[in-house]
Image: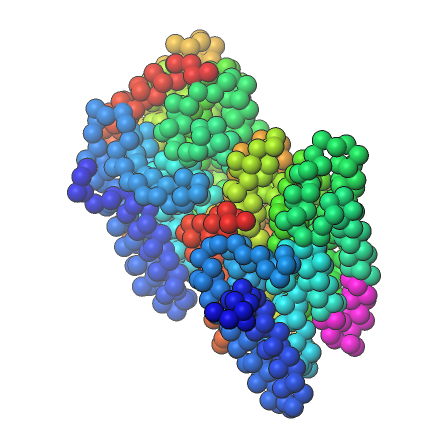
């Protein structure tokens, strides 16, 4: 990629700088230009990620679009960016979702507009940084920096119990990642003074050390994913966060944890990963089955979708720790697909919440009578969440179950129950909210989707269907990198 | 060249001290003839003296070219670490003057005493920083402490201030006594007060158990003296009361520059003098560090007074900094010493910047007749003054060690030193305790951003203070994005020891 623009840096810094510009010029008086500027930044941020996909070399399993510059010489920390088939899609997903979030907040957010948009743009830039960082410290800096805007988003524009949720979110994730910092420093020390993640992949480590490091990293990533039993921050955060916050949280932030597993845990600690695979599979299955059941009894729509997210992310970690191509690729596909579907479902709840100011299922009923367009969109997303074939939700789950089948029938069986539970809680919620007689006066007075909402949900519907019908463009970029990863994980490096 | 010229060249490194001493004496006299209404003159003079000192130090630094000079028969050492720490001490004192001016004027405390005591305290710090003899260390320490005792009691009408000053004085005198006692024992074992000669003396007694016990006995008292100055558990009792009781302007002074001097004192005594006893003092520091981080972070949560909260936060931070000091020598091996000590130095400097900003913010939010010192006073700051709420947010996240702020790199450097010294468990304990610490910093952010303000009045302050406070906060972001420069400086400074 000689002579090309530094697309990764642009993808990281355009949103951040636009965010700062929005913040600096901010004020509640000129909200209109603020929104336009934020949208322009988000779109520019998305446009620069397109060459990453278009120019991606499908045959190569190595890092592409690499950028390298020394940063802190004492610690041999470098500004080292690069993407491979595993990470490239997340930059696109993140930048795409950022646009939707900016549009979705257009007329909803009235107070402190510039701070709102600045938070989301900064967050988007930081998360692109996480997905493209190839240096341990750089990764950690971006990983941690995401906490600050999200903390503000939940705390300032959130619901009644926002302070509790924001602080819980912050402390949970900070706690996890501080141990990761110690693990990273240990790796730095063992590798003779490098923070390069790619170099760490080939670093020989004794099994006991690997196991300790595994747990050091596990907490950081497990909290983010979130895996059972460190998931309890997520329902709180989702319920209290504003719609945009929930969307970014579910669609992108959760993926940071799963991405950590595949970028750090598996390749750097392959022996410990294989050793502890049973443990990880067990935790994943608990998330899939138990949390699926928990979702069934929720009376708050956002909480229900939050639990559904945990359950679906259980699929991702399950896929990663069964060590075959279907499993890992299925996990990755599931991550992307869940990014679309959870974003869409949270936006759907947001659409209703903006009109009714309630998230309780019991306050609704018969919405289809007043909002037919909305009902059909939500039907699609609910079906996708339940894993209906021809939607993106099906592809990932199917691949993971196939992979699990190769590993063990009973694991596959347990995972497959989610198709039942997932359908049960999603469709039951859909039935109670959308169908039936018009429940009350407020529902009777509902107005259908406006153009802005139509654009947002329409784009997501297109993505969900496209990925479900023709997943090849998504999977073909991962093949080379995933195969290389699996080959690497299969070799002991004790 | 005449002998006089040689003596002058030889003694050039004390130029900043001479400037400060002469300048402060002049200030004292000038101030006698200045009326209260024209007190701005004394203030400007004090700032000019600081600027002259900074130029002096820069000149000496440039002239020395990184070499290490020992003058006055071994009493005084001029090296890069000393120069760098002094420069940051000037910055801290100068910023303290800017921040506290309006506050002191409002309360009728802007008198010549404050300025002269402050500058003499700075002189004490400089002597401590450049001390190469137990005698000089003690001299500097006492000069600094006596000035601070008096400054704490500057507001004569306040019972809390008087109580704090008494407590500080009594405990400080005790600590000085302990330090002197320890020094006398080490003198007894090595036969010298000069730190460089003590180092030679200590290496000679290696292997001699009786002498070694004697030295360690002295060492315990020296470490206690240092621990008191740093304010680490169990020698921290004075910190919360003094921070709370003193006028905020004085708390700002106590909480910033003297930490640099205390760090220098630890480096001079422990590293320059007693490095051969590292195995012994590292164990002591490990206990102090863990206790400080635990007590500081946990107790801070329970505080409703911001000054007290920041006092406990200081205790925790100094404990964290000790992790760097105790990671230098691994099994008699000095390979990672420079990294470890420069990490601690970086930590102290960054801490001083954060502490200046945090207390500066309290001064900024205080008005005539209103002390901003309770957590509640931060309520809704984001609505009253979005920009300064943002600066405070940066300060708090930096204190909590969240990237991309300088506080993170300080923690990173120190943790890295601890991990490479094999102190993994200490590092884990440190991160768990700093997680607990994050909670109370976060609470400030919560109060500022998530809560509605109680009084909706706009926040006003003199323009130079607004500028400096903004720069102070932004410097932490700048250091967070590009920490390389300051880190290299610390590295070079420690390597020059």
- Can residue B123 be seen here? The reply is yes
Camera-side residue of B214 and A12: B214
**Whether residue A155 is situated above or below residue A423 in the rendered picture:** below
Total numbered labels placed on residues in the image: 0
**Quarter of the view holding residue A52:** top left
**Quarter of the view holding residue A257:** top left
Which quadrant is home to the N terminus of chain A?
Answer: top left
At which x and y percent is residue B112?
Answer: 66, 81
At which x and y percent is residue A313?
Answer: 45, 29
**Whether residue A220 is situated above or below residue B341 in the rendered picture:** above
Camera-side residue of B446 and A61: A61
Q: Residue at x 39, y 69 (%)?
A: A29
Residue found at the far front of this picture? B2
Residue found at the far left of this picture? A3
Q: How is the image coloured?
A: rainbow
Q: Residue at x 63, y 59 (%)?
A: B73
Q: Residue at x 63, y 35 (%)?
A: B426
At which x and y percent is residue B200?
Answer: 65, 43
Camera-side residue of B155 and B218: B218
Magenta-tinted stretch: B150-169
At which x and y percent is residue A123?
Answer: 40, 47
**Whether residue B303 is situated above or below residue B433 in the rendered picture:** below
- A412 with respect to B341 (left or right): left
Please tell me whether the stretch drawn in magenta is mainly helix, strand or loop.
helix
- Can residue A226 be seen here? The reply is no
- Residue A207 part of the magenta segment: no
- Residue B164 part of the magenta segment: yes
């Amino acid at each position: 990629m000689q002579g090309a623009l530094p697309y990764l840096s642009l993808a990281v810094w355009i949103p951040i700088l636009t965010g700062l510009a929005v913040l600096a010029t901010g004020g509640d008086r000129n909200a209109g230009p603020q929104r336009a500027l934020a949208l322009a930044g988000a779109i520019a941020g998305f446009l620069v990620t397109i060459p990453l996909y278009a120019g991606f070399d499908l045959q190569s399993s190595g890092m592409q679009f690499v950028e390298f510059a020394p940063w802190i010489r004492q610690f041999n920390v470098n500004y080292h960016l690069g993407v491979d088939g595993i990470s490239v899609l997340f930059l696109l997903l993140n930048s795409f979702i950022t646009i939707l979030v900016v549009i979705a907040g257009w007329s909803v957010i009235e107070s402190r507009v510039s701070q709102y948009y600045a938070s989301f743009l900064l967050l988007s830039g930081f998360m692109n940084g996480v997905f493209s960082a190839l240096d341990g410290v750089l990764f950690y800096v971006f990983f941690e920096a995401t906490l600050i805007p999200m903390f503000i988003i939940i705390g300032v524009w959130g619901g009644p119990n926002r302070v509790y949720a924001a602080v819980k979110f912050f402390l949970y994730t900070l706690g996890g990642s501080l141990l990761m910092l110690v693990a990273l420093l240990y790796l730095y020390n063992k590798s003779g003074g490098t923070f390069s993640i790619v170099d760490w992949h080939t670093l020989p480590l004794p099994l006991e050390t690997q196991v300790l490091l595994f747990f050091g990293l596990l907490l950081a990533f497990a909290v983010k994913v979130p895996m059972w039993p460190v998931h309890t921050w997520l329902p709180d955060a989702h319920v209290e966060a504003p719609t945009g916050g929930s969307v970014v949280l579910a669609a992108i932030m959760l993926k940071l944890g799963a991405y950590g597993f595949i970028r750090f845990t598996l390749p750097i600690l392959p022996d410990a990963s294989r050793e502890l695979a049973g443990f990880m599979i067990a935790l994943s299955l608990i998330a899939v089955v138990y949390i699926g059941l928990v979702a069934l009894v929720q009376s708050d729509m956002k909480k229900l979708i939050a639990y559904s997210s945990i359950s679906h992310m259980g699929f991702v970690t399950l896929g990663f720790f069964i060590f075959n191509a279907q499993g890992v690729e299925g996990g990755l596909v599931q991550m992307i697909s869940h990014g679309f579907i959870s974003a869409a479902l949270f936006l759907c709840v947001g659409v209703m919440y903006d009109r009714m100011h309630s998230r309780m299922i019991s306050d609704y009923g018969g919405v289809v009578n007043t909002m037919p367009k909305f009902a059909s969109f939500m039907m699609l997303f609910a079906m996708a969440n339940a894993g209906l074939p021809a939607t993106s939700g099906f592809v990932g789950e199917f691949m993971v179950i196939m992979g699990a089948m190769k590993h063990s029938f009973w694991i596959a069986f347990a995972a497959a129950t989610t198709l039942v539970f997932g359908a049960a809680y999603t469709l039951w919620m859909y039935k109670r909210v959308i169908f039936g007689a018009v429940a009350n006066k407020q529902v009777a007075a509902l107005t259908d989707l406006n153009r802005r909402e139509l654009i947002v949900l329409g784009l997501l519907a297109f993505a969900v269907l496209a990925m479900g019908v023709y997943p090849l463009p998504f999977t073909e970029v991962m093949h080379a990198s995933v195969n290389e990863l699996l080959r690497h994980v299969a070799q002991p490096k004790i | 060249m005449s002998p006089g010229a040689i003596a002058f060249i030889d003694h050039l490194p004390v130029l900043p001290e001479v400037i400060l001493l002469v300048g402060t004496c002049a200030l004292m006299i000038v101030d006698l003839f200045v009326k209260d209404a024209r007190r701005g003159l004394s203030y400007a003079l004090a700032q000019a003296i600081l600027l002259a000192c900074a130029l002096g130090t820069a000149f000496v630094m440039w002239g020395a070219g990184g070499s290490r000079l020992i003058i006055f028969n071994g009493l005084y050492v001029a090296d890069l670490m000393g120069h760098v720490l002094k420069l940051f001490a000037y910055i801290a004192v100068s910023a303290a003057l800017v921040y506290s001016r309006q506050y002191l004027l409002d309360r009728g405390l802007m008198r010549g005493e404050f300025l002269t005591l402050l500058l003499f305290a700075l002189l004490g710090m400089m002597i401590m920083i450049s001390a190469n003899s137990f005698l000089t260390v003690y001299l500097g320490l006492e000069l600094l402490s006596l000035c601070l005792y008096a400054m704490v009691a500057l507001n004569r009408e306040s019972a809390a201030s008087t109580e704090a000053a008494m407590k500080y004085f009594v405990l400080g005198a005790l600590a000085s006594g302990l330090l002197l006692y320890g020094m006398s024992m080490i003198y007894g074992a090595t036969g010298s007060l000069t730190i460089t000669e003590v180092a030679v003396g200590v290496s000679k007694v290696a292997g001699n158990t009786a002498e070694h016990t004697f030295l360690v006995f002295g060492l315990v008292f020296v470490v206690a003296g240092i621990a008191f100055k740093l304010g680490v558990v169990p020698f921290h009792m004075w910190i919360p009361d003094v921070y709370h009781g003193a006028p905020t302007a004085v708390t700002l002074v106590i909480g910033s520059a003297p930490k640099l001097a205390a760090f220098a004192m630890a480096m001079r005594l422990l590293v320059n003098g007693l490095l051969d006893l590292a195995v012994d003092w590292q164990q002591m520091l490990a206990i102090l560090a863990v206790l400080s981080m635990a007590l500081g972070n946990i107790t801070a949560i329970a505080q409703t007074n911001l000054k007290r909260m920041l006092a406990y936060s200081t205790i925790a931070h100094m404990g964290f900094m000790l992790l760097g000091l105790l990671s230098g020598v691994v099994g008699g091996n000095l390979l990672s010493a420079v990294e470890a000590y420069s990490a601690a130095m970086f930590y102290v400097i960054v801490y001083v910047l954060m502490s200046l900003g945090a207390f500066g913010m309290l001064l900024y939010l205080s008005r005539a007749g209103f002390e901003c010192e309770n957590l509640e006073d931060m309520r809704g700051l984001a609505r009253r003054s979005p920009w300064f709420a943002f600066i405070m947010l940066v300060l708090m996240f930096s204190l909590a060690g969240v990237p991309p702020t300088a506080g993170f790199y300080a923690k990173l450097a120190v943790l890295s030193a601890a991990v490479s010294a094999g102190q993994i468990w200490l590092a884990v304990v440190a991160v768990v305790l700093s997680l607990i610490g994050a909670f109370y910093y976060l609470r400030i952010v919560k109060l500022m951003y998530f809560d509605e303000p109680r009084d909706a009045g706009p926040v006003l302050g003199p323009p130079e203070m607004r500028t400096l406070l903004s720069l102070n906060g932004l410097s932490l972001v700048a250091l967070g994005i590009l920490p390389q420069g300051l880190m290299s400086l610390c590295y070079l400074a420690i390597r020059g020891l």
